[in-house]
Amino acid sequence: MEPIAFETSGKNQKNYVALGGLGVALILLILLQANIWFLLMVQALAGLLIWEILTDRPAQFRLDRYAVSWVAGRQDVRIALAEIDVVRVSKKLDFSHSVSIVTKDGNRLSIPWECLPDIAELTRWLGRADITVKKSLFSFG
């Protein structure tokens, strides 16, 4: 099977599009003379995005026939496929996904959102590797 490899950093197209959207929202809120609290919330979100872009931290994910591994921030994790009991894939209320791995000894590790590859490809690959994938719709986590 072909391994899955995914790599990104803070300077990516999604962050720039989100920052542009927040800029447009801020301008509209100013034109509509919105409450100062709405303006502060939009500015706080924009500040977080600007920080993500400026720090430009790399995020990597790799899944091959032996192990799954990821690097994000201070996390550097590698889990052998033989140690995995189940992989849980949940869709959150904002329509993003969260993926967590439960090992046979009961440890639960969440894959950071910035490391996640295409979910359909990931679940197909895990199914071919005979790893149980449990899907749930609309979790809060």
Image: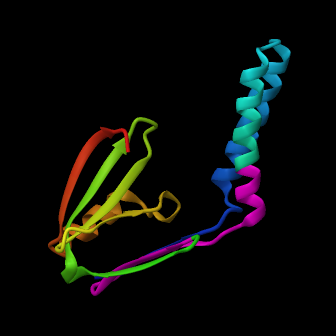
Q: Residue visible at 76% across and 45% down?
A: 47
**Image side of residue 94 versus residue 31, left or right:** left
Q: Position of residue 101 (x, y in %)?
A: 29, 65
Q: Residue furthest bottom?
A: 66
In this view of the protein, which residue sits in the foreground, 99 or 64?
A: 99
Q: Pick the quarter of the image with the N terminus.
A: bottom left
- Side of 96 where 30 appears, left or right: right
The quadrant in which residue 91 appears is top left
Name the spot of residue 139 as percent of width and height, x first. 32, 40
* Front residue (pair 126, 37): 37
Q: Is residue 80 above or below residue 141?
A: below
Nearer to the camera, 93 or 125: 93
Q: Is residue 78 left or right of residue 76?
A: left
* Magenta stretch, residue numbers: 49-72
Residue 76: percent from left, percent from top: 48, 79
Question: Do we see residue 12 in this rendering?
Answer: yes
Which quarter of the rendering shows the C terminus? top left
When asked about the image quadrant of residue 12, the answer is: bottom right
For the point 28% across and 87% down, which residue is it? 66
Vertical placement of residue 13 versus 8, above or below: above
Q: Residue furthest front?
A: 106
* Residue name at image x 31 percent, y 48 percent: 90
